[in-house]
Each structure stands twice: as C-alpha cells, then as structure tokens.
Image: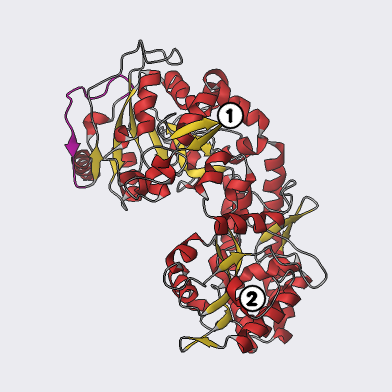
Amino acid sequence: MQKGFRLIITIILSLLLVSGTMAGCTKNNSSGTTSNTASITTSVNNATASSSGNSTSIIDNSKLTKLTVYSEMDPATAQSCKDLNDHEVFKELEKRTGVHVNWIHPTAGAGEEQFNLLIASGDFPDLIKYDWPNAKGGVTKYAQDKVIIKLNDLIDNYAKDFVKLLNEYPSIKRNMTNADGEMYFFPQVIITPENNIYKGPIIRQDWLDKLSLSVPTNINELYTVLKAFKTGIPEVNGKAVWPMSGACYSDGGFYSSSAHSIGFLTWAWDTNVGCYLRDGKIQFGPMDPQFEQALRFANKLYNEKLLDPDYLLNDRTKLDAKIMSNQVGFVFHYQPTKFMTAMATVDPGFKVAGIPYLKGPDGQKGVFDGSLITNIVNAGCVAITTACEYPEEAMKWLNYGYTEEGNLLMNFGIEDKSYTMVDGNPVYTDLIRKNPDGLAMNIALGKWSMAVCKWPATQDVRYFQQYVVTDYSRDSINAWKSSIDFDPFSRIVPVLVMNPEDSEKYASIFNDIETYIFEMCDKFVLGKESFDNYGKFIERLKAMKVEEAVALQQKAYEAYIKK
C-alpha cells in the first residue's frame, strides 16, 4: 500500500515538473521547445553560444555548454523579462563563457511550494538559487539527502576569486558555513557596511522648523520635542496627531529584523530587546537594569498621550498611511524616499528626515540592528546539485561573478549601454537614472543589473551609492551612518549556527521566552502590568531557563569566532 501511494505521488510530481529540463550539465533538453505548466515556467532555448570567439577560457567548453538553473524571478526583472535569458547580464555572460542557461522559474508567490515539489521529485537541475541560509531543517540536511553537494574542496580549487574574498573578509566564510565549517552555496555578498544602512529614526523636519526646534540628539531632547509636537500641532486636517508612533515589540524581533518597533528606543539605554555583545560576552537585554528604565520611558510617553495608543495594531501599511496623513511626528522607519515622492505634489511643505540614533540619559547608546552586519544576501545564494555532471566547471562559471570583470557586469550591466566609466568608476547612464520609458530606477535595473535582483557576486558600494539617488534619502542614511559604531560591529550578535542537539535545546527554551518577553514589554508600556512586578518578570525569565539559553548562544559565538 505504501509503495503504491509513493508511486502515485511520484507520478503527480513528474506531471507538475518539467523533467526534461532538469538533467545534468550536458544532458539538457535540446528540443528547442518551451514547456509551461500551471506551477512552473521553464525556459528552454536550444541556441548555445559558440565556445570560440566571444567566450573566454575560464570554462572548459568541451565539457560544459549548458546549465539548468532553478531560480525565482525578481519582481523588478519580471516586468521586462519573461525569463533570465532576456536579462542583459546573462546574455553577456553567455557570450563571455560559452555557457547557455535553461532557466526554471517558479510562479510568482509560489516559490516555496514549488521548491518543495522540486526537491520531492528527486529530479534536480544543475544549480538551485534559494534562501539556503534559512532552508527549513538547515542547509546541511539537503546535502545529507543528496540534493546538493559540499563545496569546500571545489571552492579551493576552482573558485580562486571567491577564495580571495573569503580570505580578505573572514566573516563571510563564518556566516556561510555550518557548525562543522562546511560550505554548500555561493552567496551574493556585501563587504561595505554602508550598503546595509537603510532604516533608523525619522522625524517631521517641517514640524521642527515650524516650532523652531532643533533635531533631538538624546532621549530627553526627544521627550521635549514630542511634548512640543503635542501642544504646537495638536491636529492636522481635523485628525489628531500622535507625536510618536511605531509597531509592537515583536515587530522588531530579537534580531531587530524589522524597522518600526518602539522597542528600538531601548538602544538609547545601551540595551536591546534581544541579545547583544559586551566585551565578547553575550548579553540578554531584558535582564539589564537599564532595560526597565527604557520601558518606563515608553510607558511615560503612552501615559502622556505622546505615543500612538494603537501602536500594537500597526504594520508598515498602517504606519505609512498615518505618516502621509500627517498623524505622526516621530517613528522608526526606512529611508524616506516613498514619503517624499508621494507627498511632493500633495503637500510640498511636507518633509520627513532621518536623524542620528539617540543617546541615553547619561550619554550612552547602542545600535543593535542585525542587518548592519549582514554580509550575505540570502536571496542570492546558489547551490550545486548532485545532478550536475561537471561541478568543477559550474564552479568556475559561478566564480566569475567575483572577478573584477564579473563584478562590473553583475552590478552595472553593459559598458556604454547601462553604464560608462568616469574617472575610473562605473556610472549608470540615463537608461537607468532617467529611463526614457519613465521606469523607476529599480525597474530599469531589473534588466541590466543583478545587484538589485540577487545573484552570486559582490554587491558593489558604487551601485548602492547611485541607487539612493535623492538628497533626502542620502541625507537620512548619512545621519544614521554618523551615529553607528562601525569598528568592528562588536556589539551585534551575528547569525549563529549551533550543533543539532544545542539547537533543539535552545529553540525549546527561547521560543517560549521570546513570546513572553514581547507580551510583557507591551503590558508594561500600556500600564497593564505594574512596574512593581518587574522583579517577578526577571525571576520568571530565570525560571524559564533564560541563562541556559544565553550560555548556548555564548558557546555558539565562541565556535563562530574560531571558524
């Protein structure tokens, strides 16, 4: 009965997947047809670039002429390309390497479901682009199940440019290896911290100007400004103004992964809702004495009606609407391009601006935004599968993105078309900056750059500097940058990988603790829990084995440092 059931499932999966395009490197469908199903669109083009003339010697084309690659299509690219063979970068890459790609693109919005179908089918393409760092069950599981292969030896022998990058930036290697130091994917990497600065505190600069107020630099000055907003601008267009708004504590999470949580106020007290580092030791913010003071400040804002009472219900959509309807004076958010663009004609006087992160009552401050130390773009990770007949040549092909020429291609596209060289630096042309068809810059880049669309390469800081084109956005980023300690991000806990036993134990402890802390933080702020019970809150955390969980984090961190 079980064998019959498995046979039925296998037949169904075979019908759902286009198996003819999923063979090894030189065994691709040569029929020249394009097959479409309701779930997966597969591009098959029989044309293969000549291995002489335009192609380079980096690939042995007597072996490798075709690759089959599974990859989600970025929304920006999907607006101008039916598949990535329409992308100018991959057109050029085929000319340079002599390797043609048959792309398998899942339907937009169904990527996870169709990835699972692909894995279950057992019929794999040569390469799979996927969020491998967050793969369910861990990336190692897919190697154990013989879906993908370990890359350590191949990287050393066939990816010299990538090896050079790992040697120069050891944290990249740490972040892409498992607990045993094994590597399973090629990532898009970020080596310049500036590329990760895109969120922070923002304020209504026009309201400051109207009330002759200076930009607040510390938590006490912020309180003064919020009070002034309440009395000086009580309402706009008949709607009440909330001097500060945001989202609940869980919105930021333990790793500050979002942008809107009022919990980011705790950083002014040099503490965090989750873990952080001090002198090489993992600290857990809610156990800090100053964490209570941060909660008391938020409670004070709430009691004095300086904080939006609906902050628990806010998400980005609701916050954006409140900001653009003049209901919010201060909030943690992304750089303000969206607001300034949308309000330019509606309310020309409207101005929001990023301000430096605030200092605490005694001049202390921490910035614990986990994205600041992210040097792997999860959506840009590619693994080589067990179906690939020539993994060494596939490795060389992937390595090209880390070469000097590959970097220019992946980030800027084609010289004299999408960019020109000016004083030794690539500068986007008006095809990108002022697209003749009126396309927004990210959409224009969707056909000419893989920096915005994610692919193994180095995300060039010169791409980021040109991508942030408005003065108000650039000024906001510079304000946040000026208040962040970049050397060497010693306070932010990196993504840690534990061995399976520790990971299971940590999850069983921390999952409950995380839920409890977010719930209690909001209760203290809203006055639903008395601060007289704060000591009991700490004791409850200890009873829930928070110290054991932190010890497991410390163990994982020490292993991380030794990688």
Q: Which residue, given by chain and number where applicable, does mark 1 sit on?
A: 424
* Residue 264 higher or lower than 139, as above or below: below
Residue at x-position 56% and y-position 27%: 162
Does the magenta run of residues contain 29?
A: yes
Q: Quadrant of the N terminus?
A: top left
> As rendered, which of 157 and 222 lies closer to the eye?
222
In space, the residues marked 2 and 1 are separated at their CA atoms by 41 Å
Q: Circle 1 sits in a helix, a strand or a loop, which is it?
A: loop
Residue at x-position 53% and y-position 28%: 402
Q: Which residue, given by chain and number where applicable, does mark 2 sit on?
A: 208
Residue 451 coordinates in the image, percent (x, y): 47, 40
Q: Circle 2 sits in a helix, a strand or a loop, which is it?
A: helix
Amino acid identity at mark 1: Gly
Residue at x-position 35% and y-position 32%: 88
Residue 134 coordinates in the image, percent (x, y): 49, 47
* Residue 363 higher or lower than 327, as above or below: above
* Residue 538 higher or lower than 453, as above or below: below
* Mark 2 or 1, nearer chain start: 2
Residue 284 coordinates in the image, percent (x, y): 71, 62
* Residue 503 located left or right of residue 340: right
Query: Which residues lie in the magenta part?
Result: 24-38
Residue at x-position 52% and y-position 87%: 235
Tell me how many marks there are. Answer: 2
